[in-house]
Amino acid sequence: MRERFESELSRWGRFAYEHAWQTIGIVLIVVAGLLTQLPKIAIDTSTEGFLKEDDPVRLTYDAFRQQFGRDDAILLSVETPEIFDLVFLEKLRAMHSDIENQVPKLVEVTSLVNARLTRGEENELIVGDLLEEWPETPEQLATAKLRALSNPLYTNLLLSKDGRITTFTIETDAYTSIGVDDDLAGFDDDADAAPLPFITGAENHEIVTAINAVVKRYDAPDFRIHMAGAPVLTDALQNSMRRDMSRFTLLAIVAIGALLFLLFRRPAAVALPLLIVILSLLSTLSIMAAAGVELALPTQILPSFLLAVGVGNAVHVLVIFYQRRRAGHAKKEAIAGALGHSGLPIVMTSLTTAGGLISFASAELGPIAEFGIFAPVGVMMSLLMTVVLLPALISVVPMGAARTADPAPQVTQRWLVRAGDFATQHPGAVVLVSACILAFCAVGAAQLRFSHAPLEWFPRDDYFRVSSDVINDRLAGSMFLEILVDTGVENGLHEPAALNRLDEMRRFSEDARLNKVHVGKTVSVADVVKEIHQALNENRSDFYAIPDDRLLVAQELLLFENSGSDDLEDLVDSRFQVARFTIKLPFVDAIDYGDFIDLLQAGYSQILPDSYQVTATGIMSILGRTIKAVMYSMAKTYVLAFLIITPLMILLIGNLRIGLLSMVPNLAPILVTIGLMGWFGLPLDAFTLLIGSIAIGLAVDDTIHFMHNFRRYYERSGDIRSAVRETLSSTGQALLFTSLVLSTGFLVYAFASMRILLQFGLLTAFTIVIAFLADVLLSPALITLVARPRPLSHMSTETTG
């Protein structure tokens, strides 16, 4: 079967040579048709975008947003020596006005200028603004300051505890306006109609850009402004992704092109592989766009990955093509010979690489699952381009005169053969040293930790990171956890017992602490009831409590609603059955969020009766679910990759023992990389999660090429050392070149602005290098120890059976 397949590939090479222009024309027409979809490609960097659309946690979050709007507000902190200064307040009011007038899709902006002040005057409830009557004298200013500092709701929301920082909380529309009638934006009168789509990345960028413009006008040494919040994070990641994707793709093309020129010293050998991979990449992105799949943070590595993988296929063909030309073969026969020699291993490696990547399709992280679908599509597109288009292009493009000697290949071939000789002469030593290294790395792998800390992806001096740190430290956090408490009955929140339980939840939450997570502030309808009750009782602080009478609670809430305030809409549903309990927390590693949420829910279960239903949601819940998905996805995808690739290796190599043996040098690089990550304290996250399955897919490529050709030469000579020498002298050179190309393709991430990408690129490049060393040293040593020389007739029967 193998010989028949190789013969058919050689025949195809001759056919492509004879019908080159027709082949090129058909391929380009198909590619052009795909490229019509490319303008539809979009980017999603939202926090919830890490989860699949049908994930229960995301569905709960979407339902919450449909009920209460966006929970991920934009926070601006303004620091000054003295907040209650007339000059400062005038500037604050001007900035507040500019935000209201210049920020699109604005729902509400809250600052000291319009902070709610609930007070009673002569048995009348007045709900107004703190600075509704603008202070003009020192006495009026002192009164406003006293009211602000004595209001418990303001602390860590509008004012820092030290009284030197005040804030703007900017809430924007949760829904998109794109393709939606202005009169219907934000709501839908038809209860059976599909919910409106949520705000897009482009609209979020427009919002953040407008706020940035306002901030730049007002920021000053005595009016220092910091900006944080999930929408700002989303925009910062999107900007970084747009900038880095184009930059990395260009860098990868330049770096790979330069390396190809150094290896081949012929312009055609640079241009043709790059053309192949660029067409493969554009076709893959077009298929993604046609399927409506958006590029996300993890999938932004797709272009560089496909460039590197696709070039590797082309390099294998070109290396053998030029070897045949140097041996005196005509161009047509050199093409046929290159496809006959390398075509089958290229098909095999593409299948195993795709098989390793398909394991990601089962991941619980949405972008990782999408990578597991479209990366294999890209690999197969690259295979088709290499096998179908490349021979036709070689036929019509001047490839340079055939050379009888090429110094560079002779040097690399000599070194590779020496490495193989060492491994076959000292197999026990090579295996023993390898086992010691793997044991050391296994200890490190046991220390591996998981992480999902978007804030730490940015450089320490990045404006967003600095701003988030300031707000975390001075205002007790910039992230929010939302707890929905369903009493199970209409008007259940009129019951004093229910409100007292919410207040008890507040006390429990404020005392809760786990690792770096602690509660900075809580807000619920219970706070509003206490505020109303105090106002209706001569504003006396000892009446800042929940009334004992259900009817009194209902009356006070009705008075509040009739005062003109719509703040209750953000805290309860229309039936007064479900309460929104908002918790403000610091922005830390999401690995800590899951246990903290469990801690809170365990406490709430002791406070609330069994008839109540408690649901945790919000951005922090999304982050906590994401890290759990990372942990589960790693275990699942790595096991699946192994289960998919191992049978393929056995089937493609055609020998059970050698197939199983070949998995050792494939798994070794992953263990080495994970072990070093553990020793150096580098976490496993949504990006480094990809390394294992990518590495096993790429490592298998080298192993297949080595084993396939070793088997070929072993069948001819029956001598292990001779077969290893011939394999490394021919295929080994292509293995070296493709490893250099692949590692170069990932090393471009060393220029990334985000630390997470830099680590991913360096670790993946390192894994590829280790995989190459394992194939030229460990594989020959293992074969030498396991295989036994035997007569040619017996050997041929066993290996081809």
Image (cartoon, rainbow, N blue to C red):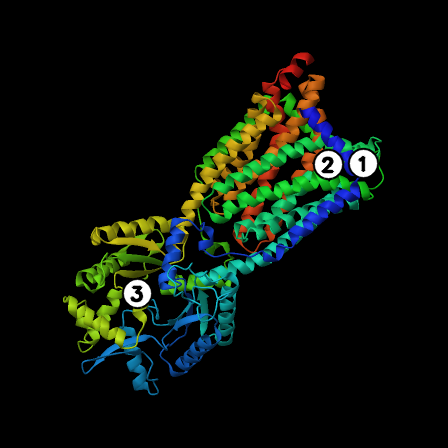
| In this rendering, position of residue 403 left or right of residue 127 | right
138 or 562, which is in the foreground? 562
- How far apart marks 3 and 2 lie (CA) works out to 66 Å
Residue 467 visible, this angle: yes
Mark earlier in primary sequence (3, 2) = 2
How packed is label 3: few (under 14 Cα within 10 Å), some, or many (20 or more)?
A: many
Residue 449 visible, this angle: no
644 or 24, which is in the foreground? 24
| In this rendering, position of residue 619 left or right of residue 761 | left
Per the image, the residue denoted by label 1 is 406
Q: Residue 571 carries which label?
A: 3
- How far apart marks 3 and 1 lie (CA) works out to 76 Å
How packed is label 2: few (under 14 Cα within 10 Å), some, or many (20 or more)?
A: many
Task: Tell me the kind of residue under disc 2.
Answer: Val
Mark earlier in primary sequence (2, 1) = 2
x and y percent of residue 303 in the render?
61, 49
Residue 578's place in the image compared with 771, above or below, is below
Per the image, the residue denoted by label 2 is 317
Q: Residue at x 83, y 34 (%)?
A: 405
Residue 101's place in the image compared with 740, above or below, is below
Q: Residue at x 70, y 25 (%)?
A: 4
Q: Residue at the far bottom: name it.
A: 137
